[in-house]
Image (spheres, rainbow, N blue to C red):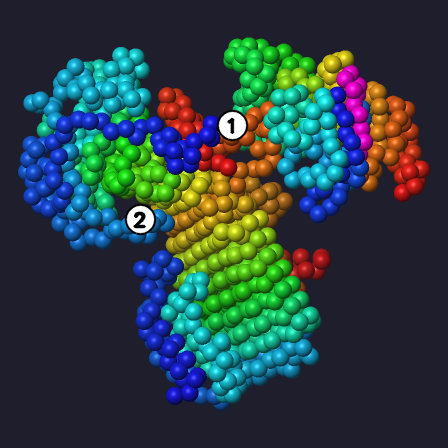
Amino acid sequence: MSAIDRLRAQAEAVFARHGVPAPRLEHWKYTDIRRVVAPFIDHASPAASAEQGGVPNPLRDLDAYRVTFVDGRLVDGDTLPDGVRVRSLAAVLAEARGEEASRLLAVDERAPLFNGLVALNAARACDGLVIDVADGVCVQKPLYVLHWGAVGAAHPRHWIRLGRHAELTLIEHYLSDQEQAGLTNGVTRLELGAGAHARHVRLQQEARRRVHIGRLEARQARASSLVSHSIALGGAWSRVDIACTLADEAARCRLDGLYLLAGRQHADHHTEIEHGAPFGVSREMYRGVLDGRARAVFNGRIVVREGAVKTDSAQRNANLLLSDRAEVDTKPELEIYNDDVQCAHGATVGQLDAQQLFYLRARGLSEEQARQLLTFAFADEVLAGIKPPEVRRYVERAAFGKLPQAGDIASMLQQAGGAA
Amino acid sequence: MNTLKPEDAARQEYRAGFVTDIESDTLPPGLNEEVIRHISARKEEPDWLLEWRLSAYRHWLKMREPHWAHVEYPPIDYQAISYYSAPKAKGDGPKSLDEVDPKLLETYEKLGIPLREQEMLAGVAVDAVFDSVSVATTFREKLAEAGVIFCPISEAVREYPELVRQYLGSVVPVQDNFFAALNSAVFTDGSFVYVPKGVRCPMELSTYFRINASNTGQFERTLIVADAGAYVSYLEGCTAPMRDENQLHAAVVELIALDDAEIKYSTVQNWYPGDERGVGGIYNFVTKRADCRGARSKVSWTQVETGSAITWKYPSCILRGDDAVGEFYSVALTKMRQQADTGTKMVHLGKRTRSTIVSKGIAAGMGQQSYRGLVRIARGAEGARNYTQCDSLLLGDKCGAHTFPYIEVKEPTAIVEHEATTSRIGEDQLFYCRARGIPEEDAVNLIVNGFCKDVFNELPMEFAVEANRLMEVSLEGAVG
Amino acid sequence: MLKIENLHVRVEDKDILKGINLEVRAGEVHAIMGPNGSGKSTLSNVIAGRPGYTVTEGRILYQGRDLLRLTPEERVWEGIFLAFQYPVEIPGVNNTYLLKAGVNARRRHQGLPELDAMDFMRLVREKAKLVELDPSFLARGVNEGFSGGEKKRNEIFQMAVLEPTLALLDETDSGLDIDALRIVAHGVNQLRSPERAMVLVTHYQRLLDYIEPDVVHVLADGRILKTGDAALAKELETRGYDWVRKEAGI
């Protein structure tokens, strides 16, 4: 048995022990995906020569390095500039160098928000990106990674390391075939060297019958910074876990997100920020708009360890329910083991502000228009932080296309854009 | 003020830590159906209540002790606890204070609850529960005139069986949770209050709970019913002697408010917290729940929790009636090695129901403090509103403060707001006070009391004063 | 009364005061003026004993004793008062209660009997008039929800109640409109006496139109560069600070 096979078997065993997470686990209390995930657990990944037909090409105006995955396999990619080493996980594993392989496939059951699906990814991942950005290298253009789900299950696994003072923007865009059911179960790991800066955008627009499981794990060294946007628009079920460890002094992270759901969509975000060292700063803002019979879950946990003095942390979660069948469950948690901190969190569930609505109507907007505009403004506070602007505009259009009577909004957007 | 060594300071701080030397009638440790039959027989209970206890016990046997709370303690041996202890009385229970053992009266004097004085002056009716039984209830005639029933629950079972049978377990059913099931099986005493239709209870009612005997659990059961349009304010205070072993306190409190009724329930909990090293102290596992059954009914819980080694307590409101109101005001202080996991549940079922939660947690020394709360807005609870403010103050770098708020909303017309902050005592505030001539320790007290003010304001006057004093005593030596 | 000798102060890793010499006698009013960041507030904070300031060299004598050995509250008991530039809000702590606790702690220290509630209220009402402070403010939390002007007036009111021997007023004029400035100045002038000394720390001449100082110092770059009488303040108003710097050779 090769080293790789052994690691795979270990991961498989861990998965067997944990299984697909069930609601009896605190972190899965509101999200029961066992039934919908079951058909894809033993689904073999499609052959290496995945069909490229039907793969869309969105965000054409974006000047970026592009990489495309189909069903979890790398099919196409641009060359990145000097100082950035990009390899495919498949290629690295084929070389089967023991140490690196075990780093790439290791399963840590003590990791924050760990669950069986994380092990399943390690066991089944057949491809992904292994990126090393050298010290001091600022990658000017964003790296745009399109994940296309054609059929069945995909377990992409990315491992990205930024050297000291390196910079990278990574956009992960998840799209899939509207006619097919399927599962995405991705893991992305970011390691930020001292003073490094990363931006990560997860744009989840999976097909309506698809289950999306995503995990972003970030470990930050001294004075590094991370800005993450997680946008959940698609999929029947989606669950995104973001675990960010501020491992050394003066690291900063900003975790923002938007879930905009309709029909019977279910989206769950769990975030965990661990302040493990002094002078850390974290900011978090998640917003949700729920229509139809949609259900959203937000759980934001902030842990401040002993010794992580001068921690400054603030978290907000706000939700708008547009329909009487929608539901939201939110839990902003603080866990603090040290007295020299400044932490605040808040959560709200409510409606549009009646005074603002009236103000807009007093300026001649119809009630419906006024609602649309305020809903747009509510959600756009999250999107405003997305860079580059082409991605922000794309996300705005995609998000507001989901709102009822999106036409009006589109025209408003256009006018706003024209004026600017 | 700080001349004592830390270990002594801990002892010094707990002023209710003496033991009363009194002969008591105590069952040997252990729990089985025989023990339950014995308790029931001792209380001369009707068959239905014995059956109710036994069914609770059988449920309990199948249940597992919950461990989701953010507290740690060694396993509890339920067979090592005595489930019944009563001060030996001559013949029947006392009819008036004159018949109460003078040693007991003395105990309450030492605790600052002079029963006689309370009877004469304060105009507060008191039910004193000593270990497993109620030893004195004051002011009964005056209350009876107004039609208010205030008596030990064991007596209510005999005198008002219909009322008790109608309401007991209707808010906290026997199988509700592990500790509630245990309580239902073995509860020995507690208070019963019934305020009839349209009656405003003419005075504050209060119960003082005292655990005295060693190796004893206290399992009191309180049932308060406010009939349509009634009002009652109820106070509860708790103390226990200092002992090196842990003692279990698993109470159940049920409140029922019918149309337009209002119940105000205030607690000052100062059970023995254990010492600096975490030896001894009360395990306080309590289930408190109010059913706001009627339209426009209102229940306010106010608690000041400074005692106990472990606190596990979530006074809750089921807001069933339309326009019902639930409130929860809490100050919890953990120091030394105390651990508290406390909060509330507000379940909004009726239309336009409103709830307010104000929680102030203070952690000092190696204390661990958690707020755990649930706000649930059911579909159809149109126009429901909740506002939660949840603040933690940290004194010292070895303590912890945690917040676990669960918010579940299924109603689009509801508005829920949750705000929470955690910080250490403000350096600027501290310096400002000192720059006005106030010594550091007093300045800390001042700021902490200010931090708690929104909660203390909800307490009846006498309790507010006691709460202030209790905070100051509790903070002595806790800051540095 | 106050004698500062060669005072050097460091905050975090920065030297802020680099050798201050200053002597204030009973009955005198000194104004310390200087550009932003010159160390003016540091000086008043060090005198009041705010934590976070390290004296690396020099000493401060107050009534002949080493002031730096005293805790902040002990300095108050000995008669020092700082009117803060940014008075902090302390929610839930009653204004009157704070003062009463302070006054009585000092009285205990002085071996005097504590004031009872009645006497104290009388004192407080009388002093409140001095700065035209609405008595309803007394019942509110310390500075809680006060406007900028109200906070500053509250500081002067507290000074009046505590009757200090040495009062330090840190930028008391900043953020005040003309009416509030006049009220505050009136309060301060009422408290001038042969036994009491005052140090006004200010950026502008404005306050000195109402409170005439005996001595004016220019503090810049952590040193006192020039000392003069009230005329110096007027000159600074018209000519700015740069000429003083040039004169001092900086």
Helix, strand or loop at label 2? It is loop
Q: Amino acid at mark 2?
A: Tyr
Q: Residue at x 45, y 56 (%)?
A: A298
Q: Is residue A24 visible?
A: yes
Q: Nearer the viewer, residue C77 or C164?
A: C77
Between the C-alphas of marks 2 and 1, the distance is 33 Å
x%, y% of residue C249?
92, 41
Q: Residue at x 27, y 32 (%)?
A: B241
What's drawn in magenta, residue-wise? C20-29
x%, y% of residue C100?
55, 19
Helix, strand or loop at label 1? It is helix
Q: Which residue is mark 1?
A: B442
User: What type of secondary structure mainly makes up the magenta span?
Assistant: strand
Q: Is residue B280 left or right of residue A159?
A: left
Q: Is residue A372 visible?
A: no
Q: Which residue is mark 2?
A: B73
Q: How many marks?
A: 2
